[in-house]
Image (spheres, rainbow, N blue to C red):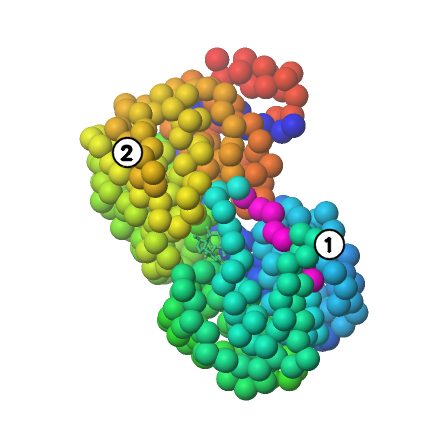
Amino acid sequence: MEQYVIKGGTPLVGEVEIGGAKNAALAILAAAIMTDETVTIENLPNVRDINALLEAMAEIGARIDRLDDHTVKINGAFVRDVPVDYDSMKKIRASYYLLGSLLGKYKRAEVILPGGCNIGSRPMDLHIKGFRALGATVEIRGGAVAAQADRLRGNHIYLDKVSVGATINIMMAASMAEGKTTIENAAKEPHVVDVANFLNSMGANIRGAGTDVIRIVGVSKLHRTEYSIIPDQIEAGTFMFAAAATKGDVTVKNVIPKHLEATTAKLLEVGCEVEELDDAVRVVASKPLRNTQVTTLPYPGFPTDMQPQMAVLLGIASGTSTVTESIFENRFKYVDELTRMGAAIKVESNIAIITGVHHYMGARVSAPDLRAGAALVIAGLSGEGVTVVDDIHYIQRGYEDFEGKLQSLGAQMERVSTEKELQKFRFKVS
Ligand code: UD1
């Protein structure tokens, strides 16, 4: 099993390039098979979740031609509308996007119920409600969701809760339904907009993405396109927080600063300097960090996917901070690990009460999920001594060459797979 081994205490300094948004890419890949023509997708992040989805899509007959690590050509002409029940599907929650795309294109789809990060119960009732509103019959049988319709018809759909997945899934199916669909209380995340732009570039008619009302006029056919995925705001935010926690000076390049506003606001509150450039942000942390309060909210609020990284930062800020998680109920599993590194955090229901400590201390910890794993790496980088992070396969689901990018900023860390390599690193840094 691979691990990260980190010697903390070196400020991160330099420039880092951010890749394409994983969560946009997952939906865009699934949507790419909605046409029989060939679609080219650029700025694809080369991470495990993406590769697992591509594998699963190939298994159901999509032609996948990987031109390089970040570019893929996809042809969905030979996709079979068979149950999508493969091991690769179970690995990623976003396989559920094939429900929306296959239902839209073939009017039937069956997809195994999603896996993914264990960060709390992740129901699909809103997706199902949307498909039913479009006229599909939806059943859950044998661990799979099966949807089918003679005809899909546009409808007015109100989402009781803001859901990124349900918004995108319904948007995809409605793109190929007859007539008009309105999604109210839609998610406004940048990747919802990116998926809408992608579908529109294939000939769909979607308006209002990025606001809470999305209007879709169905079309009968979609066509070829070439599309470049937006930068990953969570990868960017993670490097911004790593800069802050290590008292560094990092320019995070290839980003859309507007998408980072909530993250930037919190960095300013804790006492960092953030300079916004055209397609980059520079974070300088030269002063002691201060406490603050954070609540996760749907976009444009503070992202739940940045919550563990925020808590790590506040763990070494002066005073008492609170982090309230309002999206997923099980997203504080990293707290025990962080406590082993010296953090003083108490969790009461969905609120973490954090009393800042001077610094973290190296320890052996386990990544409980993707973002929390990245947060533990940040803690290790900022702390004293050597930290070993187990279960880094979670981190590799969503961060491309995480260690390589951090090393380029001066981080003393390595990815190791044997005890001998681990000892060698310890010896080197001691
Ligand atoms: C997506 C992201 C994930 C991010 C989350 C919130 C992907 C692949 N994953 O997840 O990284 O943390 O958005 O920004 O893009 N809910 C229901 N019923 C449903 C669907 C959702 O009650 O049918 C609830 C969820 O339990 C959660 C909330 O709605 O409390 C938001 O979830 P949602 O936005 O759907 O998250 P995902 O799309 O799964």
Residue 353 image label: 2
Residue 82 position (above or below residue 323): below
In the image, is residue 295 part of the stretch drawn in magenta? no
Q: Mark 1 CB in 8 Å range of ligand 1?
A: no
Name the quarter where the N terminus is drawn: top right
Q: Secondary structure at mark 1?
A: loop
Amino acid type, callout 1: Asp
- Determine the image quadrant of residue 213: bottom left
Residue occupying image coordinates x 28% and y 32%: 354
Please state if 335 lies on the left or on the right of 61 as rendered: left
- Determine the image quadrant of residue 414: top right
Range of magenta residues:
110-117
* Residue that label 1 marks: 85
Please state if 302 lies on the left or on the right of 74 as rendered: left
* Residue 210 visible from this viewpoint: no
Name the chief secondary structure element in magenta.
loop
Residue occupying image coordinates x 48% and y 13%: 430
Judge by depth and name the residue closer to the eye, 415 or 276: 415
Few, some or many residues within 10 Å of mark 2 (<14, 14–19, 20+): many
Q: Earlier in the sequence, mark 2 or mark 1?
A: 1
Q: CA distance from mark 2 to mark 1?
A: 42 Å
Please state if 306 lies on the left or on the right of 196 as rendered: left
Residue occupying image coordinates x 36% and y 21%: 342
Residue 366 position (above or below residue 73): above
Amino acid type, callout 2: Ile
Residue 204 position (above or below residue 317): below
- Determine the image quadrant of residue 68: bottom right
Circle 2/circle 1 CB separation < 8 Å = no
Residue occupying image coordinates x 59% and y 77%: 135
Residue 168 position (above or below residue 408): below
In the image, is residue 116 part of the stretch drawn in magenta? yes
The percent coordinates of residue 295 (x first, y second) are 30, 47
